[in-house]
Amino acid sequence: MAIVSIDKEKCIGCGACVDVCPFGALVMADDVAAVTDKCTACGACLDVCPVDAISLPESAGGLSLDLAAYLGVWVWVEQFRGKAQSISWEMMGQGRKLADRRKTALTACVLGHGVEQIAKEAIAYGADRVFLADHPALAVYRTAPYAGILVNLVRRHKPEIFLLGASLRGRDLAGSVAAELYTGLTADCTGLEIDPESGLLRQTRPAFGGNILATILCPHHRPQMSTVRHRVFEVPPADPDRQGQVVAVETELDEGRIATRVLDFIQEYTEVNLTEARVIVSGGRGLGGPKGFEILRELADVLGGTVGASRAAVDAGWIPYEHQVGQTGRTVRPDLYIACGISGAVQHLAGMNTARVIVAINKDPSAPIFGVANYGIAGDLYQIVPALTEQFRKRLRP
Amino acid sequence: MNVIVCIKQVPDTAEVKINPETGTLMREGVPSIVNPFDAFAIEEALCLKEKFGGRVTVLTMGPPQAVEALKEALAMGADEAVLLSDRAFAGSDTWATAYTLAEAIRKLGAFDIVLCGKQAIDGDTGQVGPGIAVQLAVPALTYVSKINRVELAPAPGAIEVERVLDEGRETLQSALPVLLTVVKDINIPRLTTIADIRRAVRMRIPTWTAADLAGADPAKLGLDGSPTRVVTICSPPGRTGTVDMIPADNAERAASVLVEKLLAENIL
């Protein structure tokens, strides 16, 4: 029993499916395609088969939920030290569009302590209703109490779609909530739209280090849950006159029954953090040493940005891990990414190739970074970066 | 101390190339490796064993060839390994994967700590760790960069860790048992010698199928048990146009040309 099945009578042995399989699960055997254990039923082969020889078995569907009972779009509003995170307002903007498409309401979930103001902001950003859970035990984010409240709210009110920002807390929380609810969760989406025929949420996300884009559905479980990458959607304009309903959520939290305690927090990013940054000036092996980051920092300061690094620079000990951009570091999506002395390994590109504008400065004109860059200078960064800093300083000063 | 490590065999994404003509992934000859984040989890488990004694058991779910990943973990020093492999598991999404791994952990018996990498480099979801924790009803401490302290007594025991969040580092304490997902800067995985590899090759690695997971609901396994469906896969749209190379013979001039172009982009 293979996951996709191939009709050996129809197969003409063209091999198109073998080439397209992202998992290397299809092979040619006796001049027809055959499926191996690596198949994950992703369906990439279905569309390329010229003779429709490949089919995906319909799932029996584990649950028989009354799908029609699930209505509305929800957004979790993340706060840190009483301040809402911009990623949540990006979710509200997109959530509003999805709710309008589905002709339903948009609900925000605000959890914390002394965060009533955030509930009002959520309405200004498009919420029709806000669930406000305000309790001392919720002041600092912890997985278990946050997940417990959201799971209870979902079970009682049955939303159709639930969006969370793909921040580290958002991914932590969504993973827990979806597991508890036995529903589908698509991580780190870069696209969300309603399928015009089925009404299902089409969730698009990068995988394989950004080498492919997969579109994922959650057909038989509810809510359809996604975490969404930072800076994919715009923050909508806030309308302070917008009307909405704030519903206080009864929380019976007993500190003695929560297994975790937050003992300390050391805020390390007094500068703009990488995932929020609009401008990132990043350095790699080509810097030749830790001192190179000083001139990058000067350029970043002039541009109101922050400093990033490639894995090579971090592994060399020139700059702490927190600055690392790429597959084993952070995924960033700034408006401007200036890569200095970075060759552009696949893993680095995976973390930054969705930046709006990419500038590459590298001595080696054949470096792969130039393949993703909008603008390139094949020269000495130690001359070019200070010159850029100087000119931006003049031009950007009001 | 009983430590269980869940690992995944993944294609080395550094070796994945895109066919420029068809825009599809070229997977031929791409080597399979232990997910890099899972190597940190194995190393941390071995460090815990060195400090507290006990056993390190490594689990993976995958096709029969995933046994190679388990052999690497045994070569590093894990005491035993179990492969979960069955056609019934095929097509599992993160929910079904977490469910299946949790059922296997239940079968292994009592544990103090389950360790996972923060995410796998092929899927990049980071959802399986928290999913296992929910199934086992233990706290999930994600993105751990350091274990400060572990105390087995008084029961149930306690652990204090540092974890990396978007704004900085949090120190978090939890009761045991617990599940941790770890990030890169927690340790440097040890290297293995030829002798380690020879020893690992001789160790027996049992394969468990769905029939071995007596407590598992067959309807929650594999594709049937998975809430999500991948409907299409395509290569991402390439970045528009080609790179605009600015002559670099004069740094001042190159800088001023670039500044003008960036100001015209209206992004600053």
Image (tube, rainbow, N blue to C red):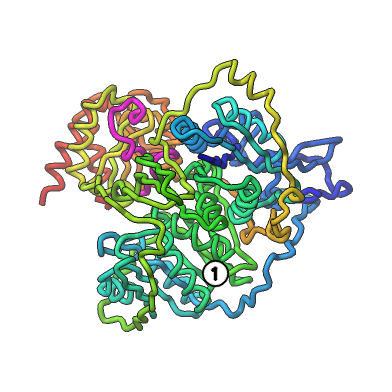
Q: Quadrant of residue A70?
A: bottom right
Residue occupying the point 32% across, 76% down = A123
> Viewed as shown, does residue A5 lie left or right of B128?
right
Type of residue at label 1? Answer: Pro
Label 1 chain ID: A
Residue occupying the point 49% across, 59% down = A176
Residue occupying the point 57% across, 39% down = B7
- Secondary structure of the residue carrying tag 1 is loop
* x then y, percent, for residue A111: 35, 69
Q: Quadrant of residue B240?
A: top left
Rendered view: B231 above or below A295: below
Rendered view: B178 above or below A74: above
Queried whether the magenta region covers residue A200, the answer comes back as no
Dominant secondary structure (helix, strand or loop) of the stretch shown in magenta: loop
Seen from the viewer's position, the closer of residues A23 and A259 is A259
Task: Single out the residue that lies furthest toward the top.
Answer: B194
Seen from the viewer's position, the closer of residues B191 and A9 is B191
Rendered view: A210 above or below A150: above
Is residue B232 in view from this perspective?
no
Residues rendered magenta in the picture: A313-334
> Viewed as shown, does residue B207 lie left or right of A380?
right
* x then y, percent, for residue A53: 81, 51
Is residue A325 in view from this perspective?
yes
Seen from the viewer's position, the closer of residues A217 and A247 is A247
Residue receiving disc 1: A223
Task: Single out the residue that lies furthest toward the right.
Answer: A9
Queried whether the magenta region covers residue A333, the answer comes back as yes
* x then y, percent, for residue A76: 40, 67
Q: Residues within 10 Å of mark 1 (few under 14, many from 20)?
A: many
Residue occupying the point 28% across, 69% down = A113
Task: Single out the residue that lies furthest toward the front.
Answer: B154
